[in-house]
């Protein structure tokens, strides 16, 4: 998967598409997911162009990496799920079911989430 500057998150970051912002700083934008899977479902998106988790881990600065972790914590606290628990998920690559070629973290909570994965058969 290569980076496509026309992907939905790149367009949101450029202001070409609307979003419902939860948090923003110099390195990340956090927005409500348009197809939420739980009462709280926020996407934390780095502002620089990284395709996947591997790409981000290899190329992002320490400041960018720390900004993602801080943003996830702030979103969880601000939206009231830090105390009851939440899940952070990154889909990366084909087997990880990544759909958009711009790495992003899902912060999901507000209800019991069940098992993370189905048992292998």
Image (cartoon, rainbow, N blue to C red):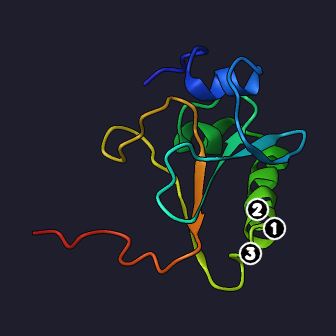
Question: Which of labels 3 and 2 is toward the front?
Answer: 3
Residue that mark 3 sits on: 80
Q: CA distance from mark 1 to mark 2?
A: 5 Å
Residue that mark 2 sits on: 75
The numbered mark at residue 90 is none
- Cβ–Cβ below 8 Å for labels 1 and 2? yes
Apparent side of residue 59 relative to residue 7 in the rendered image (left or right): right
- Res. 114 image quadrant: bottom left
Does residue 52 sit above or below 74 in this rendering? above
Apparent side of residue 77 relative to residue 118 in the rendered image (left or right): right
Label 2 element class? helix
Q: CA distance from mark 3 to mark 2?
A: 8 Å
- Cβ–Cβ below 8 Å for labels 1 and 3? yes
Label 1 element class? helix
Q: Which residue occupies 81% across, 67% down? A: 78
Q: Which residue occupies 56% across, 65% down? A: 39
Apparent side of residue 96 relative to residue 88 in the rendered image (left or right): left
| Among the two numbered marks 3 and 2 on one chain, the one whose residue lies closer to the N terminus | 2
Crowd rating for badge 2 (residues with CA inside 10 Å; few <14, some 14–19, many 20+): many
Q: CA distance from mark 1 to mark 3?
A: 6 Å
Label 3 element class? loop
Q: Position of residue 47 (x, y in %)?
A: 76, 33
Task: Please name whichever residue, 53 or 100, is drawn nearer the observer in this view of the structure.
Answer: 100
Residue that mark 1 sits on: 78
Image quadrant in which the C terminus is located? bottom left
Furthest-left residue in this view: 121
Image quadrant in which the N terminus is located? top left
Q: Position of residue 41 (x, y in %)?
A: 58, 57
Crowd rating for badge 3 (residues with CA inside 10 Å; few <14, some 14–19, many 20+): some
């Amino acid at each position: 998967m290569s980076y496509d500057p026309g992907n939905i998150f790149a367009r949101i970051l450029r202001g070409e598409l609307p979003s419902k912002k939860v948090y923003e700083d110099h390195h990340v934008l956090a927005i409500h997911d348009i197809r939420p899977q739980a009462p709280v479902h926020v996407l934390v998106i780095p502002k620089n162009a990284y395709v996947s988790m591997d790409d981000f881990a290899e190329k992002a600065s320490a400041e960018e990496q720390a900004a993602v972790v801080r943003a996830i914590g702030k979103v969880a606290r601000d939206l009231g799920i830090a105390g009851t628990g939440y899940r952070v998920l990154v889909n990366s690559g084909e087997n990880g079911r990544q759909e958009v070629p711009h790495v992003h973290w899902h912060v999901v909570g507000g209800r019991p989430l069940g098992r993370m994965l189905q048992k292998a058969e």
